[in-house]
Amino acid sequence: MFLVLALDYFSDSRVTVEPALTAVPALAAVVSRHTWYPLFIGSVAELGAFLMAAYNDVLGESVHTATVLAIGLVAAIGWVSATLRLRQERALAEAQLVAEIARRVLLRSVPDRVGSVRAAVHYAAAAQHASIGGDLYEVVNTRHGVRAVVGDVRGKGLNAVETAAAVLGAFREAAHQEPALEKVARWLAVSLDRALHENDHPGVEEEFVTLVLIGVCPDGTAEIVNCGHPAPLLVPSAEPGRPTTVRALELRETVPPLGVLDPADVRPPVQRVTVRPGDRVLLYTDGVIEARDHRGAFYPLAERLPELAVGGPVEVLRRLHDDVVRHVGHKLGDDAAMLLLQYEPMAPHLPQQQALTAHH
């Protein structure tokens, strides 16, 4: 406003820049975080308009009357727009808070140490301003060893979140109850079938879940059950003088996702591998490997992983996610979840030492 007053003072007396004051309350509405600010600035602009009109001796002219009316109108519109914008911002903040709470309830944080493995997870939802989508993950320590799941629900939105919640709830129970990993998959198939029948999702023709289950025993035996999901990647521990080679843990027999077959027909095979201390297994969803660059090329996860698998599990996943984003050039267009398990069995005497330390 002071710039307009200065221009009017130094300009030709026959030319008035008084109408430019109408932009002052409009700018105030844009930059302000308070609803009263456009009205206050509009009042100040009205005072400035009267001072300019008196100085230029145009108080009775139509240009002054039009300017005063325009300033009042713009100030009122600015007050309304500022009020609506702040309401929308508050509603968005509340929605983000609810989404974050839902994510923490559904997708719980993974501790650094779970039984005989170190674990880390990285999750990125594709929906703007959302913290949760259709991807799922969980790691639990059971009497059968450490068990984990990573899955991807077909579709997006609340329907996918609802289905993911049903699968995760079933896994958290079945992982402790069933000694055989293939029976855990069957338990999940039964729970998913029941949830899909109980929860009607209009407009969705077919619903299914791809997922991979892994169990790591304290002796280094790892069991894997894959139901239509991308194969986990095994990253052997680094050895001096030898390059790191990533191995895809593919199944010899293809198994469809859960929800495609009748639960009674779900009999997935179990693949068993032996892992050594320091070996890592990466589980992920297709949002990672289907991320495309500007030329349409998919992200080469197996090629990039050896170079990025340096440091602890948390650092590896953070570095891997940043590399995927660089490959795409912008925010990922699909939900992406990654779970990294590093086999590090605890020394047999360590619990005793910890107990003695706690006692003293």
Image (spheres, grey):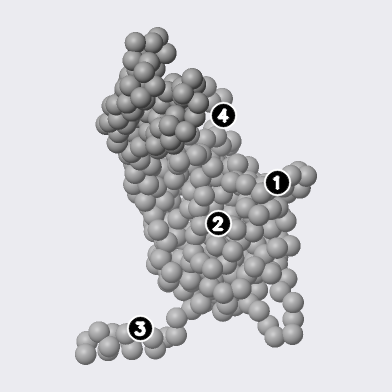
Q: CA distance from mark 2 to mark 4?
A: 25 Å
Q: Position of residue 159 (x, y in %)?
A: 46, 32
Q: CA distance from mark 1 to mark 3?
A: 47 Å
Q: CA distance from mark 3 to mark 2?
A: 30 Å
Three-letter amino acid code of the residue under disc 4: Glu
Three-letter amino acid code of the residue under disc 2: Met
Q: Nearer the viewer, mark 2 or mark 4?
A: 2
As helix, strand or loop, the secondary structure at mark 4 comes to loop
Q: Earlier in the sequence, mark 3 or mark 2?
A: 2
Tell me which residue sits at (54%, 42%) in the image.
126
Disc 2 designates what residue?
A: 338
Q: Earlier in the sequence, mark 4 or mark 1?
A: 4
As helix, strand or loop, the secondary structure at mark 3 comes to helix
Which quarter of the image is occupied by the N terminus?
top left
How crowded is the residue under tag 3: few (<14 C-alpha within 10 Å), some, or many (20+)? few
Q: CA distance from mark 4 to mark 3?
A: 49 Å
Which quarter of the image is occupied by the C terminus?
bottom left
